[in-house]
Each structure stands twice: as C-alpha cells, then as structure tokens.
Image: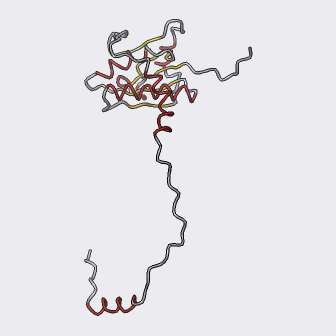
Amino acid sequence: MSKPKLPNEEEIQQFRDAITGARPLAQDKIPPARLPRNKKTSVKTSAEPETRHLFYFSDEFEGYQADGSIIRYVQPGEDPHLAKNLKRGEFQPAVVLDLHGLTQLEAKTELAGLLAYCQQQHFNCACIVHGKGTGILARKVPNWLIQHPNVRAFHTAPTHWGRDGALLVLLKTPDKTPDMR
C-alpha cells in the first residue's frame, strides 16, 4: 500500500483561509445523567445467596474417597439409581461451570454461586468442569458437593460433557407449587 500524501504548503494555507472566522459550537445538548456512586450495595445484595451457599463448604472435610477414575455419589435417602441415570445422560445440564485455572478459593466461590443460581432458576442439573491437571480441584469438588444439602447426586460426566474432567450434578429444586396448608 502507498503512504498517504501529506499536504503541501499551498494546501495548508487554503485550509487556514477556509477556517478563518470559524468559532467553536456552543454545547446545546443535555449532559448525561451521573450514575449513583454507591454501587457496592447492589453488588452486595447479589452476592448474598452465593455467600449463604459458600457456608456449607469446608476444606478440612474429606468425606468422599474416589475408588478409581469414576466419581459417583448419591445422598442418603435418595434413589440409588440417580447416579446411574446421570451416567447414562438421562439428565441434561442446564448450565456448565468451568473451573479451569481457578484457585481453590475462587473455585469454591464459583461453585457456591452456581448452586445459588441453579436454585434461583429452578435448574436440577449442572455440569462442573474441574479438569484433570494436578487433580487438586478434582479431589476438592466432590468433597464440597457432598457437604451441600441441595446436592442429590453426582457422577463423572459422560464423554460429550467432559468425561473424567467433569461432573454432572443433580440438585434439589425448590417447590414450584404454592403451599396449600
């Protein structure tokens, strides 16, 4: 490509002559409204459900021991076939959470946010991608999940959802029907 041609002295003088007597335009527009400065209150209210769900997770608790590469769990009192149904893909996740590259604290916070979001949206199944990597999150995520009362079951995801690097989680959803007492 050729470089743009720079103006010569004659063109510069013609431009100066053309703008002689020009004056700036007066502002005739209404200035934009200023946003309120205190935005922290709105952020704080949206983080409250996440904080409530974060309460359930303890890093010291190690209640889940994997026996091989398959990770499965069914909460006591639930149908024992739920894990098998998850494995077969009978439940489709409504949302996917990718924890790749996050620290344990960030992953725990994101997981709490996901559980709060699923409860708010009445989603009963989610996919959590923890990755294979060094296995820190692969060990922590199941231990965090079994501590949460809304988790009914989880199983290593089918191949199309991430296989060994992901979990399908089945969640309790709040009743959609009003209480008729």
Quadrant of the rendering where the N terminus is positioned: bottom left
Up-down relation of residue 121 to residue 55 (above or below): below
Q: Quadrant of residue 134?
A: top left
Q: In this view, does 88 lie above or below 74?
A: below
Estimate the x, y position of residue 98 in percent, counting from the top left.
39, 31
Image coordinates for residue 74, horizontal then vertical, percent: 47, 11
Q: In this view, does 162 lie to the left or right of 132?
A: right
Please provide percent x and percent y for residue 69: 33, 16
- Tell me the residue at 50%/38% (across/down): 42
Q: Is residue 109 left or right of residue 174?
A: left
Q: Residue at 40% of width from left, 27% of height from top? A: 109
Image location of residue 56, percent across then percent down: 44, 17
Q: In which quarter of the image is residue 5?
A: bottom left
Q: Residue at x 31, y 90 (%)?
A: 11
Q: Relative to residue 150, is residue 174 drawn left or right?
A: right
- The residue lying toward the viewer, choosing from 166 and 104, is 104
State the count of labels: 0
